[in-house]
């Protein structure tokens, strides 16, 4: 009898240990706490602009009309929500008529499953703004490429830009905004 009790305790301890290890593994996967110490910087040039490599450029002739370049349609400054966030957001119309959202000088925390969303929700300061963006309409522009730097996000051609008044860096895993900006007309 003593031996069976010991065997049961051993099996129970093994089962508890297995549950603890599985729970810790799931918690690490779900929260990904290491991302808080990992920064990813992405520096992209604005589409439709030409970077020169130090070679002199020819002067345009007086009769040549300048090629239409990217034009800022709307923009705003990022405010912090769940995490300290700063930078500038610009909605830019390219020469071909397509649009991109450009994040410039972005600085926020890294996190699991971060997305860039155009939304119809108002931007609220502080905790009041953490959870408002999934209540209305939004269009996802994809995963956040990096938590620092300047990046471009193509806007789908069928997106009705008149419906979206703000942008959020949204953590889809925890349904919370890291930061957001009102998009005021340029």
Image (cartoon, grey):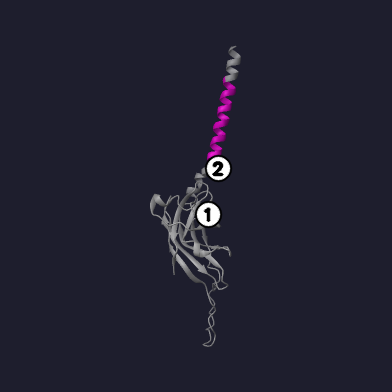
- Magenta-drawn stretch, dominant element (helix, strand or loop): helix
| Residue 24 falls inside the magenta stretch | yes
Q: List the single residue furthest toward the left.
A: 125
Image check: 84 left or right of 49? Answer: left
Residue 91 image point, x, y percent:
49, 66
Residue 41 image point, x, y percent:
51, 58
Compute the Cα span from label 2 to label 1: 18 Å
- Number of labels in the image equals 2
Observer-side mark, 2 or 1, equals: 1
Name the quarter where the N terminus is drawn.
Answer: top right
Contact between marks 2 and 1 (CB within 8 A): the answer is no
Viewer-side residue, 102 vs 74: 74
Viewer-side residue, 86 vs 37: 86
Range shown magenta: 9-28
Dot label at residue 29: 2
Q: For the point 56% across and 24% down, which residue is it?
A: 13
Circle 1 residue: 115
Q: In the rendered view, tell whether residue 111 sits above or below residue 9.
A: below
Q: In the rendered view, tell whether residue 14 sits above or below residue 92.
A: above
Residue 93 image point, x, y percent:
52, 70
Q: Secondary structure at mark 1?
A: strand
Label 1 neighbour load within 10 Å: few <14, some 14-19, many 20+:
some
Q: Secondary structure at mark 2?
A: helix
Viewer-side residue, 67 vs 12: 67
Label 2 neighbour load within 10 Å: few <14, some 14-19, many 20+:
few
Q: For the point 58% across and 22% down, which residue is it?
A: 10
Name the quarter where the C terminus is drawn.
Answer: bottom left
């Amino acid at each position: 009898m003593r031996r069976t009790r010991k065997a049961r305790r051993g099996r129970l301890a093994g089962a508890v240990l297995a549950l603890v290890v599985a729970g810790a593994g799931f918690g690490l996967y779900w929260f990904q706490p290491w991302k808080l110490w990992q920064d990813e910087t992405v520096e992209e040039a604005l589409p439709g602009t030409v970077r020169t490599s130090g070679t002199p450029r020819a002067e345009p002739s007086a009769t040549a009309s300048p090629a239409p370049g990217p034009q800022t349609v709307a923009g705003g400054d990022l405010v912090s929500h769940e995490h300290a966030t700063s930078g500038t957001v610009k909605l830019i119309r390219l020469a071909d008529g397509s649009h991109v959202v450009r994040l410039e000088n972005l600085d926020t925390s890294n996190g699991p499953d971060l997305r860039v969303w155009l939304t119809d929700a108002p931007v609220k300061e502080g905790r009041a703004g953490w959870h408002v963006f999934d209540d209305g309409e939004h269009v996802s522009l994809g995963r956040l490429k990096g938590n620092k730097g300047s990046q471009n996000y193509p806007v789908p051609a069928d997106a009705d830009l008149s419906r979206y008044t703000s942008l959020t860096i949204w953590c889809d895993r925890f349904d919370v905004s890291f930061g957001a900006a009102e998009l005021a007309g340029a």
